[in-house]
Image (cartoon, coloured by chain):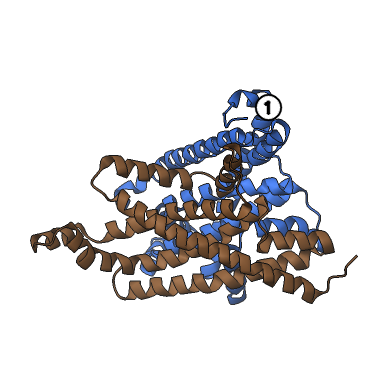
Amino acid sequence: MGPTLDFLTLLPYASELLQGLTTTVMLTVVTTLTGLTLAVAVAYLRVNGQPWVRWGLSGYVEVTRNTPFIVQLFFIFFGLPGLGIKIDAITAAFIAMTLNLAAYSAEILRAGISATAKGQLEAGRALGMTTLQSYRHVVLVPAFARVYPALISQSIIVMLGSAVVSQISVFDLTYAANFIQSRNFRSFEVYLLITLVYLLLAFGMRRSFMLVGKRVFAYQQGEQR
Amino acid sequence: MIEFTFWDILRNLLLATRWTIVLSLIAFVGGATVGLVLTFMRLSSSRWLQRLTALYVDLFQGTPLLMQLFLIFFGAAALGHPISAWWAASIALTLFTSAFLCDIWRGCLEAVAKGQWHAARVLGMNYFQSMRHVILPQALRLSIPPTVGFSVQVIKGTALASIIGFVELTKAGTMLNNATFEPFTIFALVALLYFALCYPLSCYARYLEKKLYDAGLR
């Protein structure tokens, strides 16, 4: 048989592809929200927390940033049940992705936060804001705006990295691809199509993030540029 | 059934770590070579070459590394030339690395102020002379910290080769797990070994970054 491409053989598997796409999109949307929220908390505590909290969080961030995502996933899915903590595959994927995104984003945010001068925070206090208010308006939001592009990229990296969750039998896009190629033996066509879908997802994510950013950080545009 | 002691597990994992290191070195050296060519293509005066390289970088940065591995592994077979997991992993990781290094290095070359180009040209240097004597030495200093930092991503990327059956650290971990049913110990050890490889590089990258910063170059 010659090397011919036949994409029509994929048509009967449209429902599997759709299921995979839905899972990947849902996982990405949820973990982006939880991951970035957790990142804010981690970044805050790494600067303002008790020494032992800071130390512990630094450990978490460094371990996460210096080990492969797939190993983190396997540790959570296969390793934790050994301690009596049983979790299903999709939950393990959700936890692993959230922890991964949070560790990287916390480090990115920390760079943004440390760029804000101490005096600004004191100015906020002097204007009558509470500590939390001035932290939010003077430090956090500008820091977020400053590192927003890096956060977009990191969220996209986590989305692309989520292809690995297929290895613990989460029915995501990659799992759908593996499933289809095991049925119709058209591996190259399937993976080419799925790769294109990931590419479109990455593109779509960047665009929608930028649209959101334009709205949310609109009042800061003058200051930024 | 063979019984595995803790030391058996650790020894097997350490032996497999060799292949993670070898694959990382192949990917890094190969990726740097291809990446260097790409960087100069990206900065050439030909619009066509610029677009082509930009597309290449976007394609590799916008798709999962796992898909790149699958496409090369299964694509070669579909074209009638099946290749081993070794080759597929080496090629995929080389291409992946080259795309990211091209992007990093282009940024570094562009970070050297435009005025320096003009100054060099005014002094009568041609393109290659100004590149060699003025731009490259400065860009090189800027590029070392992010390049070292990226090597960590390459090492972590090699873990995905386990999925196409390449026996490196992660694959050895899953195989040992199937034989011993001690997932907690094994994956903790696997993570620890990756950490031992990556953390020194991360620290070194940070140190170099700080040195540049202190020198006022950033």
Colour given to chain B in the rendered image: brown
On the rendered image, what quadrant is the N terminus of chain B found in?
bottom right
On the rendered image, what quadrant is the C terminus of chain B found in?
bottom left
Classify mark 1: residues with Cα within 10 Å, few (<14), some (14-19) or many (20+).
Answer: some
A105 vs B143, left or right, is right
A167 vs A192, left or right, is right
Label 1 belongs to which residue?
A13
One can see residue A131 in this view: no
Chain bearing tag 1 is A
Q: Nearer the viewer, residue A216 or A71?
A: A71
B81 vs A215, left or right, is right
Q: Residue at x 42, y 64 (%)?
A: B147
Residue B163 % position (x, y): 66, 51
Residue B4 % position (x, y): 84, 70
SS at mark 1? helix
Query: Where on the picture, by quarter, is residue A192?
Result: top right
Residue B107 % position (x, y): 33, 56
Q: Residue at x 71, y 67 (%)?
A: B188
Query: Where on the picture, by quarter, is residue A166?
Result: top right
Q: Nearer the viewer, residue B9 or B218?
A: B9
Colour given to chain A in the rendered image: blue
Residue A40 % position (x, y): 54, 58
